[in-house]
Amino acid sequence: MTKVIKVFIFLLGSIFALIFYLSFVGIETNKFNQLIKNKITEINDKISIELHDVKIVLDIKNFTVGIKTYGPDLFFKNKKIKLEKISTSFAISSFISKDFAIKKLAISTKKNDLRDIIYFVRAHKNSPELFILNKILKDGDLIADININFNDKGEVKENFNIKGFVKNAKINLLNKQVIDKIEFDFVIKNKLSIFKNAKFEFNKLKLLSKEIVITNKDKFFLVNGDIENSLGKISPEILSFYLKNNYENLGFSDLNLSSENIISFKISKKLKFSDFKINSKIFLKNVKYIKKIDSLKNYLPSFDNYLELHDHIINLEIDKNKSLITGKGKFLLNENYDEIDYNLAFKNKNYLIKSKINIKKNPLIFKLLNYKKNKDIDSILDVEFFIKNNNLLQFKKILFKESQNKLLINDLNFDKNFRIINISNLDLDFLNENKIKNNVLIKKDKQNYEIIAKNLDAKNIIDAIFDSKNDNKSFSIFSDFNSKIKVNIAKTYLDNINYINKLNGDIEFSKNKLINLKLNSKFSNDKQINLTVKINENNEKITTLFSDNAKPLVERYKFIKGFDGGKLNFFSVKKNNKSKSQLKIYNFKLKELPALTKILTLASLQGIADLLTGEGIRFNEFEMNFSNQNNYMKIDEIYAIGPAISILMNGYVDQNDVISLRGTLVPATTLNKALGSIPILGNILVGKKTGEGVFGVSFKIKGKQKNLKTTVNPVKTLTPRFIIRTLEKIKKTN
């Protein structure tokens, strides 16, 4: 009995020792190699394996037998996958019955070409994502641990797990962009792929990601993750790709920024991207903008076709059809820094932009209002506007404030050609360069407008109208202006000295054309000034201007100096862009007119020339008859008569502003002698005098205003035309 017990104990100990050995040490054999190969072939008959000795290990806890082999190689066609280890397990019952049923399969790889791995995986189970990856992947190494579980039928369960890391990968995107130097750790489960600690370069921009998760939603892939980049220059190609435009054509250069981005989007099975969601924090170190914008120089004189943004903190949110950008920072014009903050919202193809610009270091000019903000004076420009999907531009508010000065515009709307459709309110309260306090309110009432002002410096506005080659040019900024304007201005300055009081009247426009105007006012000495424009039954535009004080109107022409006194009467008829006009000025004195002075000097009429530049020459009447068509002015006749001299001339002013005049100038003494020699009429007009011959000058003037060339020739006989015109004037006077 004792011997039997000893034998039993020995056997039991041997079994335990064998179990212990098999569990912790195992045994090596090559007897199972063919069985493993057969099982691999059962999974995929195109895959073969090359094995070394196999170690068998017992797992009592799970009642399975484990098999491990080191350094095997998998082969698929001409592709070789180098493995570190393969381990699997069988149920002990199937091991005893020699009907092996694989429960688990664990594979650890050595470093392999990533493209070979994808090729091998696709051989077992292809998918759209693997097909895409195979197309775009051009390089890379992979090391992975693969764990697969099998059901009782030997089929792979969906709870597989693959993890590892990739280095030195390269992807060529479908748009020919390249992502290079890719490194990341990964975990791949049934419908979930997780990529961690990623590093890669896109057009030399170094990018990082803590985690990117790709979820297979059957119909599409959902991508969630983060991407960031350290401070660095952004290449032109990146912005050109995202902005769908040539980056350099946009005028940007030297873009330097860092960013932190949370991203989400969908990828369909057909590689279509949708439902982008981006939340970004961007630090814009600097960007340069070089663009020739001549119109901007009219307001920002320091703008030299060059702008820089510096140190901007920007928050970006993009979600389906809406986007939001908020930011603030500095901008540099020339050598002067100022600050700006902004808010841009995009929804349903419409943009809403709000911005506040602190302008201190840079000067600012509004030429039409004769206003200038000097350097080193604080001011704020507050702007809020929409850009509609039909390209309409709508300014809800434009507010400029500097000290006590304010310029406010509400509801200013433009069409796609940047012409004004509507303006609801304009409120101006500022001191301009002439030290004139302007208080102007323009408000809309239904379709019409009203201008109410205490003071208005209209000098630059009048200059703009007078300098216009086309009388409709001032209103070409409107899209389709059909309104009546009621005017009520207490004091209107025509220049730095002259002003008129109680400017009242009405103005009417139809399709941008002035069709009716009636304005009345008085100078400080109660002298009248009236302007009318109307369209008659023949579709002729008739303009009249009368002023008891001609000086403020005549002195606008800089080549005339020392004008004094006079009354002005102007009449014009225009049709089909062609006009005929007459200008008359009565009883005035002229002290300086360069062209006339030169004629008198060349004609050796020094006494009259001295009078012109001294006390001035008095004229009884000046009359000018002329016609205009497009940019060409034909001067039919200019006639001036006075106690000292009389002048008769004609000519033209062409589209290049070249002046060409020719005419006759005669001193009054000579004229009296000439008229006195006319039988009977001479005795009546100038008394009995004996004609001793006639002396005067003919002249020609040609060139631009600043470079007029004058020639003078003496004449012995006056033209009949000169004599007739003089007689007409004398008869009227008498």
Image: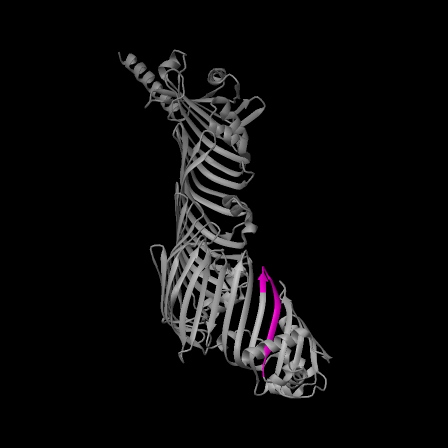
Q: Extreme left residue here?
A: 1
Question: Camera-side residue: 546 or 685?
Answer: 685
The part of the image, by quadrant, that contains residue 675 is bottom right
Across and down, in percent, residue 108 comes to 47, 30
Q: Which residues are magenta?
A: 627-642
Q: In the rendered view of the protein, which quadrant contains the C terminus?
A: bottom right
Q: Is residue 580 above or below residue 209?
A: below
Across and down, in percent, residue 78 comes to 59, 23
Q: Is residue 503 above or below residue 18?
A: below
Q: Is residue 502 above or below residue 13?
A: below
Question: Camera-side residue: 185 or 520?
Answer: 520
Across and down, in percent, residue 624 comes to 58, 71
> Is 634 one of the magenta-colored residues?
yes
The part of the image, by quadrant, that contains residue 100 is top left
> Is 553 one of the magenta-colored residues?
no
Q: Residue at x 39, y 41 (%)?
A: 321
The part of the image, by quadrant, that contains residue 56 is top left
- Asked whether residue 83 appears in the rendered view, the answer is no
**Position of 367 compared to 676: left or right?**
left
Question: Camera-side residue: 7 or 606?
Answer: 606
Q: In the rendered view of the protein, which quadrant contains the N terminus?
A: top left
